[in-house]
Amino acid sequence: SLKTISQKNNVSSGYFSGIFKKETGFSFNHYLSMVRLQKAEALLIESEKSISEIAFLCGFNDSNYFCEKFKKVYKCSPGRFRKEKCAV
């Protein structure tokens, strides 16, 4: 989380967030979400794990929220992605 990484670097969340956005062009939360979705993409292709298990392994505490975020980026559900490898 932003709070955890800020604390580990002994800076405020606001300061870390500003530096992160300046250096990467992305907000920390957006970047973290994209990293999690990329990991989920790999797991959907490479494993037989359930959608819920993949969601939790990738840091999503709610599989419905994971499916919503995944569909928004990949334009298809995780299950359909696994079957058809939808294009981004």
Image (cartoon, helix red, strand yellow):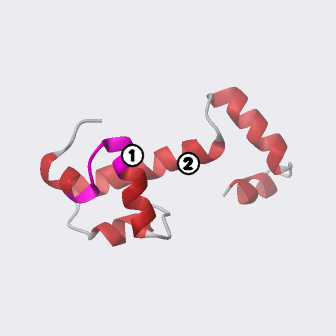
Find disc 1 in the rendering and name its residue: 72
- Amino acid type of the residue tagged 1 in the rendering: Lys
Give the crowd class for mark 2: few <14, some 14-19, many >=20 residues within 10 Å.
Answer: some
Residues at discs 1 and 2 in contact (Cβ within 8 Å): no
Residue 68 coordinates in the image, percent (x, y): 40, 56
- Name the foreground residue: 78 vs 38: 78
Q: Which residues are magenta?
A: 71-79
Which quarter of the figure is the N terminus placed in? bottom right
Q: How many marks?
A: 2
- Name the foreground residue: 2 vs 69: 69
Q: As displayed, is residue 37 above or below residue 58?
A: above
Q: Which residue is located at x 13 percent, y 54 percent? A: 83
Q: Secondary structure at mark 2?
A: helix
Q: As drawn, is 86 to the left or to the right of 28?
A: left
- Amino acid type of the residue tagged 2 in the rendering: Leu
Q: Which residue is located at x 26 percent, y 48 percent? A: 76
Q: Where on the picture, by quarter, is residue 27? A: top right
Find disc 2 in the rendering and name its residue: 32
